[in-house]
Image (tube, rainbow, N blue to C red):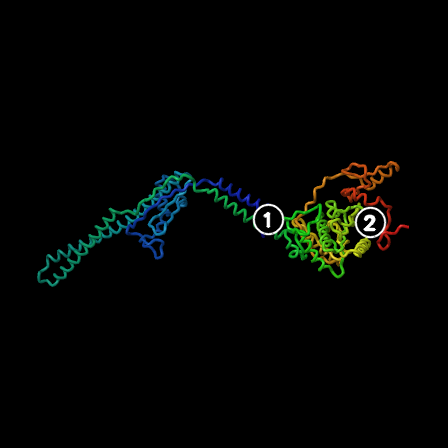
Amino acid sequence: MLVAMRRGRWLLLALLTTGLLAGAAVAFASPKVYESRAQVLVRPTGVDAVNVEGGRTKSELNLDTEAQLVRSTEVAALARDLLGASGDPGRLSSRVTVEVPANTSVLTIGFAGDTAAQARDGAAAFATAYLSHREDSAREVIETEAATVDAGLEDLRGQLTEVSAQLAGADPRDPQKPVLTTNRDLLQTQIEDLASRRSDLDNRLSTLAGGRVISEAALPEAPSSPIVWLDLAGGGTAGLLLGFGAVVARERFSRRVRRAADLPERCGVPLLGELPASVAPRFADVYGAYGPPGKLFGRLRNELTAALPGNGRVLLVVSIDPGPAATVVAANLAAAFARADRPTAVVAAHASPFLALPDLLGTPSVPGLAEVITGRADLDEVANRAARHPHLTVIGAGSAARASGWPTGTMRQLVGALSQSAELVVVESPPAAGGDDAQRLAGSADAVLLVVESERTRLGAVIDFAEQLRRVNTPLLGAVVLPRVRPPAVAPVEVPTVQASRKAIAKAPAASAPELRFDGGKPVEGATEILPVVPGGTPVPARSDSAAEKKPGPRPRRSPSADGRPCQRG
């Protein structure tokens, strides 16, 4: 996952930046909201709802109910009148927040306004309206109870008057007189109780107070919303989540090789090795034996030795995409075999416009394989020993080298001749995406090693080439994954073709013909080399003077014999 995040870091960074910009846009586009708070100490009125069991406070008040009353329509209507506003009271109550601190009898009433003054006035109005509504509700209950007591007193006093009159007119010997006396005493007691109760109600009315404001609403100094850092954090978090999702989806549904595990999991191709992205490609020399890349190719050498079928000696190195990737792998793999004191030959079967295989091993590119196949040179004349690897023989591509059009039987005979003196022949193939040349060369090889570039090679191309190898019955040992290899920057030079160079030499006087070498498009005296080009007019880099002195001049064209070897001179 970390590797996927590293590969998709630009996408992740882009979505993170987008999220931050979106958060900033929301923060600056949102209207400013100011909030002010007032605290109210709630006192019992004697007519409050009893606190339910498990309530948040231990007093006789149910503050959860009181908090709901603060936002009620009745309180909102009173607050609207105090503010002198108009409209639906419900819109005002939607701006109110009420908090109940634990184990207290305090309500914290907040109000959100468009301005600081509006927030302060709203919080004060709702605090006052709540206390007023609470007192009015309690007064209404007490007055209703007092009216009931007054009615009871009036009825009892009427009854007392009637009983007293009956008792005054009764005969002392009347048997009903004791009953009347008892009734009179009972009525007097009830009247005294109701009178006492009525007196208590009067006292409660005179001292009625539902609470008081203990913290006045203050003028807020800064808006409470929007909170810029919070919007930025939210936007950044959303951007990161989208980025992670996009990277995972990209890795999961990508049609390119994003990670080495894609080859065995999605293509069914064994993975033999992976060159870390931190290792820079080398275009002037092969990797050292003791560095991480050198150890990777050493391990790959051991695995290929065990995996080559039977007496297989010819290994074709094929890259899916055009570029120097196959050249780098073929040169370093051949050097790894040579370091193990195993006679090895490496052949460039095509002239790469990006990097010549002999350049990595310090040998000349011309003459090469093209001259052998066209009969202009013998095999031993184009074979060069690598200076730093005495067990390694290098054969360049030659001039105008290409694999297309070469008879398959001829190529098989050439590599067969090389395998007589070498334990392993490594052949650098043209790219598989360039046509059918790689498949045709695979018919002359004992096994194939595939070179894949991450972030470039398509999965479908890997699957298609594996199927091509299956149809020609050539085993695919596995694949090596390299980070995307950028071709080395080479300044283009205009170099005459081989035919033009020969015409120039033919026209010059034989006695005084200068020896020519083309350097940067200009002829220089003192050398015999004619610099050739590859198909399409791409120049092959010039050889050193020592190499020019070592190689003979142009040879007459000869045709290969029936068995594929150059014919002997008559």
Give the residue pinned by disc 1.
Answer: 6
Q: Earlier in the sequence, mark 2 or mark 1?
A: 1
Neighbor class of circle 1 (other Cα within 10 Å; few <14, some 14-19, many 20+) is few
Q: Nearer the viewer, residue 94 or 338?
A: 338
Q: Provide the secondary structure element on which disc 1 rests.
A: helix
Does the CB distance between marks 2 and 1 fall below 8 Å? Answer: no
Above or below — where is 319 with respect to 36?
Answer: below
Q: Which residue ends up furthest to the right in the rendered image?
A: 570
Find residue 396 and report its horizontal and vertical position in percent. Answer: 77, 48
Q: Which mark is residue 88?
A: none
Give the residue pinned by disc 2.
Answer: 381
Q: Nearer the viewer, residue 8 or 361?
A: 361
Residue plotted at (11% across, 63% down): 175
Cα separation, mark 2 vs mark 1, equals 49 Å
**In-image side of 362 versus 253 (left or right):** right
Viewer can see residue 468: no
Find residue 256 and report its horizontal and vertical position in percent. Answer: 65, 51
Q: Provide the secondary structure element on which disc 2 rests.
A: helix
Label 1 is placed on what type of residue? Answer: Arg
**In-image side of 449 versus 122 (left or right):** right
Label 2 is placed on what type of residue? Answer: Glu
